[in-house]
Image (spheres, rainbow, N blue to C red):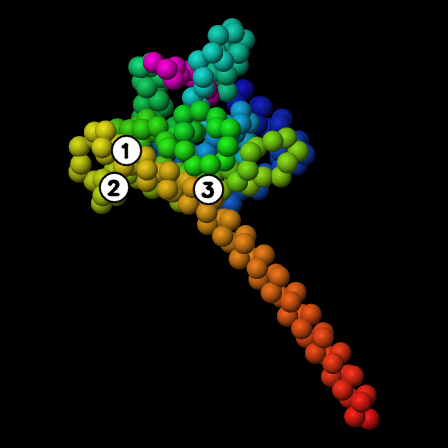
Amino acid sequence: MLYYILKIIFYIPAKLFIFPMKVIGKKNVPKKGRMLFCANHQTANDPILVALNINRRFYFMGKAPLFKNKFNNWFLRKCGAYPVHHKENDIESVKTTLKHLKAEHALCIFPEGARLKTEEAHDLKNGVVNFAFKTNSPIVPAAFVKKTLAFKRNVLLVGEPFNLSEMEEFKGRKVDKELLTEASAYLKKRIHGLLRDYNKKKQDKLKAKQEKIRNKKIIKNCKIALKKLDKGIN
């Protein structure tokens, strides 16, 4: 309940003023059923903006230290977050993740494993694809175009969902380290492919605009030259 109350309260001020965000490909997010929403991750604002801009009830993994304070622990859990210990074999968080997926919930997970200081591509952790294989869950790749900073316009790209278990290159294979590494590389390709395609379209659009301006100048200069020539003849 708290999740929806906060979303209603903060949606308009966050969307219009604090974190103006355009979402491209929102229709690619399944309206129901289990899924793993996987995006790049650079600031603590990322999960909040996913929750505000995507019309699904999400559950999130969070660093265990964030849950040490009693109020934080209560508040974060009410908002759909649960703790994970990155530096140890955290069986409890694995069980919680599998439980959510088997209950047909939507999980938002950042497969790079931590917030990154740069916008460069990094290798992904194998945990996300392992969850996908274990529960036959579709993955929705997504990418923030820039760091999600307050009062800075940003774009969230959402790609088409895919199911690793149903892909020819992975179907029927034993789930081992080799398979998980290949699947993580594929997920990385899909996430950063969104950024590559977006930037290419943006550059193509800019080139087309510049070409249009150049053509207008050429036409204008031609008209001027013709007028001068016409005056000279007369």
Above or below: residue 226 compared with residue 140: below
Local secondary structure at mark 3 = strand
Q: Marks 1 and 2: in contact by CB < 8 Å?
A: no
Q: Is residue 216 above or below residue 106?
A: below
Amino acid at pointer 2: Glu
Counting residues from the N terminus, which is met first, the one under dot 2 or under dot 3? 3
Q: Which residues are magenta?
A: 80-88
Residue 92: which quarter of the image?
Answer: top left
User: Is residue 84 found inside the magenta-colored segment of the image?
Assistant: yes
- Residue 177 magenta-drawn? no
Quadrant of res 229: bottom right
Give the x, y percent position of residue 179.
23, 34
Secondary structure, mark 1, is helix
Pick whichever, 230 or 54, lies toward us: 230
Of the pair 8 and 183, the residue shown nearer to us: 183
Badge 2: few (under 14), some or many (20 or more) residues near its Cα, within 10 Å? few
Residue in the image at 55% along x and 41% along y? 155
Dot 3 crowding, Cα within 10 Å, few <14, some 14–19, many 20+: many
**For residue 19, what is the image quadrant?**
top right
Marks 2 and 1, the one that precedes in the sequence: 2
Q: Residues within 10 Å of mark 1 (few under 14, many from 20)?
A: some
Q: Which mark is residue 166?
A: 2
Gap in angstroms between the C-alphas marked 1 and 3: 23 Å
Compared to 103, does 55 lie above or below?
below
Residue 120 appears in the figure: yes
In the rendered image, the vertical position of residue 49 relative to residue 201, given as above or below: above
Task: Say left or right for 178 vs 139.
Answer: left
Front-lying residue, 115 or 117: 117
- Residue assigned mark 3: 158
Q: Which mark is residue 181?
A: 1
